[in-house]
Image (spheres, helix red, strand yellow):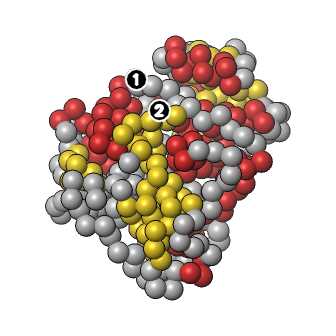
Amino acid sequence: MRAWHVEAPGPVTGHPLRLHPQDEVPRPGPGELLLRVLACGVCRTDLHVTEGDLPPHRPTPPGVTPGHEVVGEVAALGEDAAGAGFATGDRAGAAWLRSTDNTCTFCLRGAENLCPASRYTGWDADGGYAEYMTVPAAYAHRLPDGYTDAELAPLLCAGIIGYHALQRAELPPGGRLGLYGFGGSAHLAAQVALARGATVHVLTRGEQARQLARELGAASAGDAADMPPEPLDAAILFAPVGDLVLPALAALDRGGTLAIAGIHLTDIPPLNYEKHLFQERQLRSVTSNSRADAREFLDFAAGHKLAVTVHPYPLDAADRALQDLEAGRFDGAAVLIP
Ligand SMILES: [Zn+2]
Ligand SMILES: [Zn+2]
């Protein structure tokens, strides 16, 4: 099978990814499913894995296969994998959270996204930039009807993380939400917030993204560091740019919350207490997601048809898709189709 590997993490323009044309199809281990990949979304985290912003977890050659927004067809079941209810031929999703220990204090209190023993698809184990991959059946997701494979892929990270970030931002009912950056994750979170009656203000570079925001129902769309037209009850920073923490905090109303959705952020400049935090404004991070978050979001997507803006690329063009993502050459989400 064809599979991409992160051979030498570094800038995407230097081709850190290599396509191997004849890898062996992996065998599903105990409790695992073998998926034939139908579509795999291209997430900013893949860029961080590829460029080395995230330390390599599998540095030995040939390096890990990225990709954690995987829509696949169950091609085979490993030993004892039937208990999770998947059968050969079913459509199943693989997301970023690949496994947890189920025993630590975080897992036991329902915060398995914080499990110190958690492992991740496309970082610790090979992901979906390939024709086949394996996933633990207990961590595979059932997918809603009414979407194409390509539309489902971005829901599996961009969608779930955006949903979890929205929870972390504690937007009050009917509240005013600011979204900083408007890529794959933000354009889905915006639709969830709008469906719940929020007023959404989008602040992002790129006229194309601002145009998409207005089409989806945003009340305003300005440049990344602009002040929104009204104070915000909550904000989510999707752009991996620490400089934007300051204008986002300054835009919050009293008691407002800013959630930082990314796994990686450039340094945050010094804060001014009066201007950025006083009046009980809160600054929070967002770390991965639990399976419960994923289920809740996918149930939401089953009941509300989300508009998913997809840019398909052939599997062989994964490096170009990452370069285009880094350069901001598309809005919505890139999806690899084997
Ligand atoms: Zn745990
Ligand atoms: Zn992701």
Can you see residue 128?
yes
Amino acid under disc 2: His
Q: Quadrant of the N terminus?
A: bottom left
Q: Please tell me which residue is depicted at 45% across the width and 40% down the height of the picture.
A: 335
Which of 241 and 292 lies nearest the eye of the viewer? Answer: 292
How far apart marks 1 and 2 lie (CA) works out to 11 Å
Label 2 sits on a secondary structure element that is: strand
What residue is disc 2 on?
A: 311
Q: Indicate the position of residue 23 as horizontal and vertical percent values.
A: 23, 62
What is the number of the mark on residue 164?
none
Left or right of 299 in this view: 185:
left
Against 233, is 219 above or below? above
Q: Indicate the position of residue 127 as horizontal and vertical percent values.
A: 38, 58
Q: Give the mark count.
A: 2
Residue found farthest to the bottom = 80
Against 292, is 199 above or below? above
Nearer-N-terminus badge (1/2): 2
Left or right of 62 in this view: 175:
right
Amino acid under disc 1: Arg
Which of 219 and 3 lies nearest the eye of the viewer? Answer: 3
Q: Please tell me which residue is depicted at 35% across the width and 75% down the height of the picture.
A: 27
Asked whether the residues under the numbered discs 1 and 2 touch, taking CB atoms below 8 Å apart as contact, a structural biologist would say no
What residue is disc 1 on?
A: 329
Q: Indicate the position of residue 250 as horizontal and vertical percent values.
A: 60, 24
Mark 1 or mark 2: which is in front?
2
Q: Is mark 1 within 8 Å of ligand 2?
A: no
Q: Please tell me which residue is depicted at 43% across the width and 31% down the height of the picture.
A: 241
Q: Indicate the position of residue 304 as horizontal and vertical percent values.
A: 76, 42
Q: Please tell me which residue is depicted at 72% across the width and 19% down the height of the picture.
A: 219
Q: Residues within 10 Å of mark 2 (few under 14, many from 20)?
A: some
Label 1 sits on a secondary structure element that is: loop
Q: Quadrant of the rendered structure where residue 217 is? A: top right
